[in-house]
Amino acid sequence: MPVASTEWQRTKDAAQQLINKLQYNPKDSKSAIALSSLYIQEARITGNHVYYDAAAMKYINNVLDNEPGNFEALTLKALLYMSQHHFADGLSIAEKAQKINPYNALIYGILVDGNVEMGNYKAAVENSDKMDSIRPDIRSYSRISYLREIHGDYPGAIEAMKMAVDAGGAGDEPTEWTRIQLARLYENIGDLKNAEMHYSIALYERPGYPYATAGIGSIALANKNYTKAISLYEQAAAALNDYSIQEQLSRLYRLNGNIKKADSLLQIIIAGMNSDSKMGEQDESIGHYADRELAYAYLLKNDHENALKHALAEYNRRPENIDVNETVAWVYYKMKGYDKALRYITVALKTNCKNPQLLCNAGLIFAKTGQKSLAKSTLQEALGNNPNIDPELKTESENILKTL
């Protein structure tokens, strides 16, 4: 029986036991927190955030109504806000929880995440160091890895992510999720052999794991085996409600010449994200900010007006975040507003991040703003290891580099 099936049954049984306890005693905060934790984990595994986030938030708020200073409930509420991309709110709640218990590793992990998303990179590093000093484990090592990646240290990021994988239990969802992140680091440095190996291990340890299936599809895409890549991404999309997987599938359909199918799926993606966003305006427990993701989806549709609207909406929430600045820059690039794009891409490069897609975007913007020498060196650095990135971006970057 697949890991997911046995795990789901255990989770279902545990949830029912907790529900029974809460029906008997609605003020049983320990059971409410345990049930909320299960719901949060299921949201991550299934991608069904609308249902599970709302369920988790209901029990968390019930606890906080009775115990406003309950540390565990505040921690879970902060986690939920992070999951929903309400990063400022999540960070604020995490800071409140940290004052209640300054010796808990997880709360520092949430502070890392919140500060990264808000663009407070120095604070993120400080909180990561604190987290690691309290409890070096899969969660702290993975955050160290991400911070090293943000600051351009790919060898260090890979080393830390390996430590994170080794610290987890094989087959557990957090471990295999971490292994997927390790594989993606390898893709970014052009090491497809190691990337494919780790995707395959994740799929072996956790049969049917959609992120691993999509990862192997990404390797097939790199090898221009579009038929295989599409099949794998379709399997992943059927198993998990994840807009990034669906968006990549839309790109694959387009690359394979099936424009009608690509456009149809893109419409579904945009409608879904807009629906999630509107729900958030009505109910904070289920709302999910998706403006950055919507900006890229609208770019695929060549709807630059809506792409810019959503990119700037996210920028207004998080003006210091490098990924958000990259998004705004790229929308302006597509609109041929190269001078405006330059302003934002400069901020996106402030941490010395060496992500090859970021460097390609930057190199193309430099080329269009007459900075040929900088464009050449940036594109050479981006493409030097033949990273596995969007093939259309890669081709455009290679063609521009030939002219410099």
Image: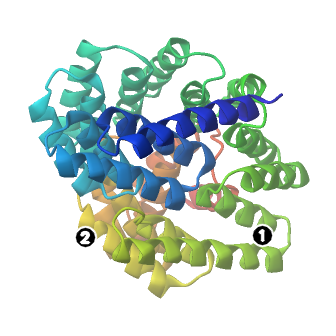
Q: Name the quadrant containing residue 111.
A: top left
Residue sitting nearer the eye, 202 or 318? 202
The Cα atoms of the two marked residues, 1 and 2, are separated by: 32 Å
Q: 182 above or below 80?
A: above
Q: Do the residues labelled 1 and 2 touch (CB within 8 Å)?
A: no
Local crowd at mark 1 within 10 Å, few (<14), some, or many (≥20)?
A: some
Residue drawn at the location 48% of the way across and 58% of the way down: 361
Residue 267 drawn at (x, y percent): 66, 79
On screen, residue 105 versus residue 58, left or right, reads left
Q: Which mark is residue 316?
A: 2
Local crowd at mark 2 within 10 Å, few (<14), some, or many (≥20)?
A: few
Secondary structure category for the residue under label 1:
helix
Mark 1 or 2: in front is: 2
Residue drawn at the location 53% of the way across and 34% of the way down: 17
Could you tell me which quadrant the N terminus lies in?
Answer: top right
Residue drawn at the location 33% of the way across and 53% of the way down: 81
- The mark tally for this picture is 2
Residue 264 drawn at (x, y percent): 75, 79
> Amino acid under label 2?
Asn
Q: Is residue 117 shown to the viewer in this render?
A: no
Residue 218 drawn at (x, y percent): 73, 45
> Amino acid under label 1?
Arg
The residue identified by callout 1 is 254
Residue drawn at the location 49% of the way across and 62% of the way down: 364
Residue 112 drawn at (x, y percent): 27, 36
Q: 11 above or below 23?
A: above
Residue sitting nearer the eye, 33 or 214? 33
